[in-house]
Amino acid sequence: MHVRWLIPLGAAVASPVALATQYLSVPQAQQEAFPGAGEFRAVPVPDAAALAAVGVPAGWAPQIFEADASGKKLGWLIVDQVIGKSEAITYALALDTAGAVISLEVLEYRESHGGEVRMPAWRKQFVGKTAADAAALNREIKIISGATLSCRHLTEGVQRLLRLYALALRAPA
Amino acid sequence: MQRKPLALAVLLSCAGLAPAAHADEAKLKAEVEALRAEVAELRGVVREMQAQRAPAPASPVVATPAASTGVAVAPAAAVAAAPAATTAAGQPVPGTGGSGVALGANTSFWGYGQLDYNRPTARAADAQADLTRAVIGFNHVFDEATRVYGEIEWEHAIASSSDQGETEIEQLYVEHALAQNYGVRVGLTLVPLGLLNEHHEPSNFYGVERNFVETAIIPSTWREGGVSMYGNTDWGFNWNVGIGTGPNLGAWDPAADEGRISPLGSIHQELQLAKARDPSVYAAGNWQGIPGLLVGGGVFTGKIGQGDATLPVDKSRLVLGEAHLRWQPGPFDISALYTRGTISNTQDLNLQFLGQPTPVPKSFWGGYVQGAWRALEWGSDSSLAPFLRYEMFNTGASYAAQPLGLGTAPLPTQHVWTLGANYYLNPNVVFKVDYQKFRYEDLVLGYGDRFDLGLGYQF
């Protein structure tokens, strides 16, 4: 009677191992956010003065890509990392040409708990937000119970990238 | 593989030497010198190829300069190899939380702690201050699919033969991801019942002390040894099923009060030389498809006699079920939980315990509703959240029928109101204050109106 409980668990252990933490590669995130883009140009990280204005020290090094289609700019994809509880979460924020969030994707998640931040329903809360909304995001984004730190720190990461857009990527008026 | 160009060069050299065997010695020497020069040149080429094939040194995530080279995509591996949100100097970037401390690329540790002050309003002489717990946790990643995760806890400041403190391993398991959304854990894991047991850090709950229902009925922190599987779906459903050790009814002490304070808390084994003849199983699920909403529940069941030959416990089975809900709209945080447990076939066992103060209950239950409000905020980190909680619970709601005159009356149901506030200096440091009002007082079981102060932290 007791042995039968072990059968499904044993079968599962025998399953082939897959990469557990990488959900999307950077190229996949680029294509998902900008399916019509023909080119993703890497953009240099802003200088130390701009980073200081964003509120981070020099040395912070997100990957910034400009998405283009036939010479027309579609927006930006920025790949960055935040700490969840004790491990890094790699995420990608896609912004349109007006600086509004197109999507937030979790590329890699390494924590043992709190992976619920990958849920589409939670990430959708950021869609349409702009730098003008950044300050209020802590209040507006609903937290997932049990994934409090991951939610909070990803929200802070998005705020930082929205500030980065406003200070360094947005075309001068 | 990188030696292939060299081998090719040697073969070519040999081919070149064959006709030279017919030439005079001087010419032969000249040709040998020429070949030596060619080999030296080929060695240089091979070194260059080796240098190109070698992985680039680890570097922070740096976007390459803008260039009109078409699709310029940094490989994902560059992101994976980068230090976790750190500056070139290795310091956490502000705004990334800063929880946990990295010890090299694959290991990190963290911790939490709780200090309490309890002052019964009617008996100031019983006021008590305690370093309730200090915990150090660690996480070591072996590869992209496998990790070991553990927590070591010290309770009540000092653990020695002459003190009341304890040192314990609260969690210790190896986790192996079988796919992106499910995996297996083997070791000592937390039982995934209720809102508190898996998320018991002091910054995660309101009030100085953990609530009574998730202490007396679901005995937090409840952990068992065994094998479990976990997983989640894109539509917000998380599940966890497991098989492993369970409580040991043979360890029930009818002369002690612990069984009335927490029936399962008095017989759970915590994987300390655990008697393990009878495995228990559990299944739990949570749905979080709407941000801010959590609906879930779980069941734990198993025979808990564990082969004890001295007591009639062989047929006894524990079933504990619970359902919970948490809703966090805006600044509000509302939660509710109900749980009920039964232990079967306790009649013969309790007959042996006649005259003792603590027979084994047939059923025990509890429930609470709680509302909190993040009323004040200072900046993005500090906040004040008053809360109100109402609990009902009974650790001995019924007992197995006995011959006339020998039965045990159910315990009275306890009702507790808790009014207080959590002040978060930052999300990881919380000061707490509350007042608890009990329907009836029982000094033995720790029931009595009291005023509490607390400090909690986690990193």
Image: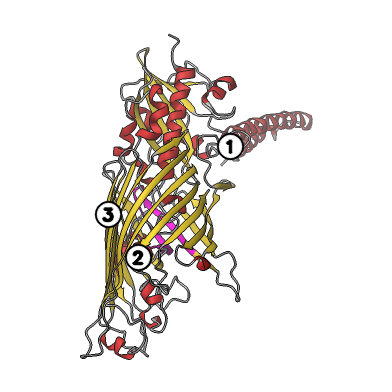
Residue at image mark 3? B296
Q: Quadrant of residue B7 in the image?
A: top right
Residue at image mark 1? B58
Please indicate, yes or no, whether residue B15 appears anywhere in the rendered image. Answer: yes
Pointer 3: residues within 10 angstroms few (<14), some, or many (20+)?
Answer: many
For marks 1 and 2 on the same chain, the one whose residue lies earlier in the sequence: 1
Answer with left or right where residue B397 lies relative to residue B190. left
Residue at left offset 59%, top offset 27%: A58
Question: Do circles 3 and 2 both sit on a common chain?
Answer: yes
Pointer 2: residues within 10 angstroms few (<14), some, or many (20+)?
Answer: many
What amino acid is found at the position of numbered circle 2 in the picture? Ile
Q: Which marked residue is nearer to the observer: mark 1 or mark 2? A: 2
Q: In this view, does B206 lie above or below A76?
A: below
Q: Is residue B265 above or below residue B403?
A: above
> In this picture, which residue range is highlighted in magenta?
B170-192
- Seen as rendered, the residue at the extreme top is A173
Which numbered marker is on residue B71? Answer: none
What amino acid is found at the position of numbered circle 1 in the picture? Ala
